[in-house]
Image: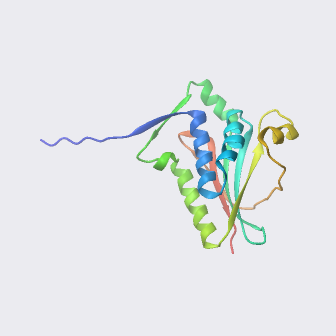
Amino acid sequence: MTTTYTYTATRTYTRIELLKTQVRIALRRTTNISPETLASTFDKGLNKHLISKVLIYAVDNQNRCKAQLILEIDWDEYNLQISRGRITVVVDSNKWKDDTAIELDEVISLFNRYVATYSLTTKWQVYKAGNLSYESWLKELGLVKGDDIKWERGWSSPIPELPELRVGCYLAED
C-alpha cells in the first residue's frame, strides 16, 4: 500500500509586519531606496498608520512617467481585521516566494520588465494617512511635497491573505 503525504509549509506573521514586508519588498526590488529611508520613512510611517499609498514610477530620460506600480493600504480594513482577532496572518511558503505575496511578485516582475525594456528609471511617492496635518506628516516622515501624476488606465488587485493591501500597475502604451 502506498501512502501519499502532502506537505504545506506555512509561515505566520503579525499583520503589520507582513504589510511592512510587502512595502519594503516592492521598494527594494524596484528602486534604489536606502535602508535608512526604509526605516525612517516606511517602517515608521506604517507602524503609525501614516501612509495610505506607495507609488513607484518609471520615468524616461525626460522625466515623463511611463509606468506606475501602486500599493494601497486601507487602514479601516486593517483595523477591522485586528478587531476580529486577526492579528496574525498565515501564508503558504510554497506559494509566497521569498515572503512576497503572489500578486505583488507578479506586478513587480511586470513592472521591472517594462522598466528594463524601455530603459526607464524609477522613483517613489507616498500618500498621507492619519490625522496629522500635511506639514506635520511631511516633517514626521522626513519627506518633501512631490507632484501628482495622473493616469487614465490601469488595474489593482487585493491580496486575499492581506485584504487591507491592494497592488496595482499602470503602463503607458506606445
Q: How is the image coloured?
A: rainbow
Which residue occupies the foreground of this view, 157 or 119?
119
Q: Is residue 88 left or right of residue 44?
A: left
- The residue sitting at the bottom extreme is 174
> Would you say residue 64 is visible in this rendering?
yes
Quadrant in the rendering for residue 3: top left
Which residue occupies the foreground of this view, 137 or 93?
137
Residue 124, percent from left and from top: 72, 54
Residue at left offset 61%, top offset 34% = 16
Q: Is residue 153 above or below residue 127?
A: below
> Would you say residue 163 is visible in this rendering?
no
Residue 123, percent from left and from top: 72, 58
Residue 105, percent from left and from top: 53, 54
Residue at left offset 64%, top offset 33% = 78
Residue at left offset 70%, top offset 46% = 37
Image quadrant holding the N terminus, namely: top left
Quadrant in the rendering for residue 93: top left
Residue at left offset 54%, top offset 42% = 160
Q: Is residue 130 left or right of residue 90?
A: right
Residue 85, percent from left and from top: 56, 24
Which residue occupies the foreground of this view, 5 or 47?
47
Q: Is residue 132 left or right of residue 31?
A: right
Image quadrant holding the C terminus, namely: bottom right
- The residue sitting at the left extreme is 1
Quadrant in the rendering for residue 14: top right
Q: Is residue 115 above or below residue 36?
A: below
